[in-house]
Amino acid sequence: MLMRSTGLGKTELKGKITGLVRLGDYLILQVETTEPVKWKLRVGICRPDIWQVMKGILRWKNFKLLLNKHWGTVPPHPGEF
């Protein structure tokens, strides 16, 4: 997983999702960054956010990514995102 923040300038963070837990009316996405720093990030996702993510995933061009048979390979860097 690659992450960028406008607050960090052009710094790119690498990390992985370590958990997804329900806390009340929120899903808490837990992410650990590995480079260039080791942080534990948590993102609280509520119902409208969940629908927004689901609608985005179910668009055909994004859904095709889920059908890809190359799950174990790391794709090339997307460039500026």
Image (cartoon, rainbow, N blue to C red):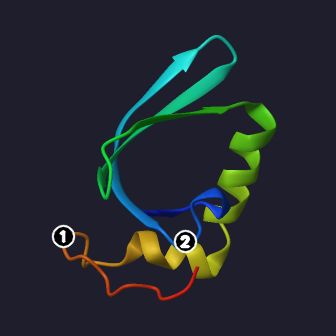
Disc 1 marks a residue whose amino acid type is Gly
Residue at image position (74%, 42%) is 49
The answer to the question of whether label 1 and label 2 lie on touching residues, with beta carbons closer than 8 A, is: no
Q: Nearer the viewer, residue 37 or 43?
A: 37
Cα gap from disc 1 to disc 2, whole angstroms? 17 Å
In percent of width and height, residue 64 lies at: 50, 78
Residue at image position (59%, 68%) is 9
Q: Classify residue 47 as left or right of residue 76.
A: right
Residue pushed farthest top? 24
In percent of width and height, residue 33 lies at: 34, 48
Image quarter in which the C terminus is found: bottom right
Q: State whether residue 5 is above or below residue 74.
A: above
Q: Nearer the viewer, mark 1 or mark 2?
A: 1
Disc 2 target residue: 63
Q: Nearer the viewer, residue 18 or 72?
A: 18
Q: Classify residue 71 as left or right of residue 62.
A: left
Q: Nearer the viewer, residue 66 or 39?
A: 39
Disc 1 target residue: 72
Residue at image position (57%, 60%) is 8
- Mark 2 falls on what kind of element? helix
Q: Residues within 10 Å of mark 2 (few under 14, many from 20)?
A: few
- Closer to the N terminus: mark 1 or mark 2? 2
In percent of width and height, residue 23 lies at: 57, 14
Q: Name the image quarter holding residue 67.
A: bottom left
